[in-house]
Amino acid sequence: MDTELGTALRAAGLRVTPGRLAVLEALETHPHSTAETLRVVSAAGLSIQSVHNVLADLTAARMIRRTEPAGSAALYERRIGDNHHHVVCSGCGAVADVDCIHGEAPCLTASNTNGFTIEAAEITFWGRCPLCQHKITTPKETAS
């Protein structure tokens, strides 16, 4: 995978560094991660500042996507180049992808663009994940 990632980094105009490779690899198995989570799971011994620098570089190069659900730290993922949205659990904060049924971005038409050219629309759905639904519907055990 390092060869593929290295090629992708070079194609994006970025140098191939151990930190960039570690963060990209960590995002492969941990999508929708915060910078702190990526610092821990990358196992590259990166400082949090280094992780933030890598994430900024990768986001600017459009190799990863940054989303910021309300009340959450910024989340990062490698799924780019398509028009998908997110669903966030209002109980535990779990995040999952939701494919857009309208296809190409932007999937919504603004009623007034104020002269802007609309490139994308970010939609976040909120609800309860299956685990949190179960917690709500299952009565808590009482201590005897």
Image (tube, grey):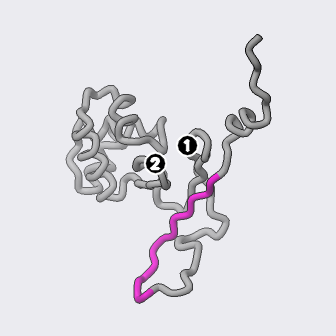
Across and down, in percent, residue 18 comes to 24, 35
Dominant SS of magenta comes to loop
Among the two numbered marks 2 and 1 on one chain, the one whose residue lies closer to the N terminus = 2
Q: On the rendered image, what quadrant is the C terminus found in?
A: top right
Magenta stretch holds residue 125: yes
Which image quadrant for residue 37? Answer: top left
Q: Are marks 2 and 1 in contact (CB under 8 Å)?
A: yes
Residue 142 lies left or right of residue 54; in this view the side is right
SS category of the residue bearing label 2: loop
Question: In the image, what residue type sits under mark 1?
Answer: Gly
Tell me if mark 1 has few (under 14), some (14-19) or many (20+) residues whose alpha carbon lies within 10 angstroms of its own. Answer: some
SS category of the residue bearing label 1: loop
Q: On the rendered image, what quadrant is the N terminus found in?
A: top left
The residue range painted magenta reads 114-126
Q: State the residue at coordinates (46%, 78%).
A: 118
Vertical order, 62 against 47 (above or below):
below
Magenta stretch holds residue 120: yes
Across and down, in percent, residue 75 comes to 43, 48
Q: Tell me the number on the disc at residue 72.
A: 2
Q: Tell me the number on the disc at residue 123.
A: none
Across and down, in percent, residue 33 comes to 44, 41
